[in-house]
Amino acid sequence: MIEPISLTAVGVFALTEGIKFLYTEAGELLKHRRASKEGERQEGSEPELRPPADIVEGAVEPTHPNDERLERLADELKKRRGALIDYADDVEAVDPSDVALLKEVDELRRLIEVIYGQRITFKGENREPSGPLVENEVRAMEAEIVDSEVGVVEVESANASIDQLTDVAGAKVHGSTVGKVTIGPSRTKEEPPEEEEQP
């Protein structure tokens, strides 16, 4: 996970406008999901990621959301969006030194990044510039969002092996061919599997 502290370098303008953009984008995604579920989705009405160029570092490619990821993360997206409503509506002033606020901004941003498969980095932020995420990055980010202790990377391939299972971001996969990589719940080394009671 990118530490929220990286956002402290972002100026008030970029952070304020960034919050408004993320809040609005999350709303568009949730409306898109509702329309899809109710059968009211119209051709060509999908949201498109287009952050204002004057607040982002790098280039975000205009792209459409991944509906499967949106469905999985919708509840969390709604929750994180709600936490920023007063800042998006200018009811509360944005303070770049408010770590709790920066954490909420970062959480909402990561959800949107996963749904679109695009990194969104604000100007002045000490982070990789905006741009497409590779699939492994998206999977790791989604795993962290869904469960901070998720750490199993299952590889289906005769030529693959895994060195580490307890840290998704640090998992190393060896082999010339990897057929499938999936992420799911795991146990940490400190939590051995439960043994069945003997009669």
Image (cartoon, helix red, strand yellow):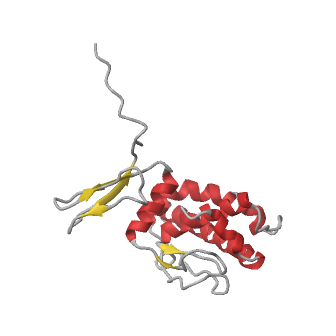
For residue 52, side relative to residue 147 (left or right): right
Give x and y (percent) for residue 49: 55, 78
Residue 101 quadrant: bottom right
Could you tell me which residue is drawn at 46 percent across and 72 percent down?
A: 117
Q: Is residue 52 visible?
A: yes
For residue 142, side relative to residue 21 (left or right): left
Could you tell me which residue is drawn at 76 percent across and 62 percent down?
A: 98
Quarter of the picture holding the C terminus? top left
Give x and y (percent) for residue 20: 70, 72
- The residue closer to the viewer here, 180 or 176, is 176
52 relative to 171, above or below = below
- The residue closer to the viewer here, 189 or 19, is 189
**Numbered disc total:** 0
- The residue closer to the viewer here, 37 or 75, is 75
Could you tell me which residue is drawn at 37 percent across and 55 percent down?
A: 183
- The residue closer to the viewer here, 164 or 42, is 164
Could you tell me which residue is drawn at 67 percent across and 82 percent down?
A: 55
For residue 117, side relative to residue 81 (left or right): left
Q: Is residue 68 visible?
A: no
Give x and y (percent) for residue 51: 61, 80
For residue 71, side relative to residue 4 (left or right): left
Residue that sits furthest to the left in the current view:
158
106 relative to 195, above or below = below
Give x and y (percent) for residue 164: 35, 53
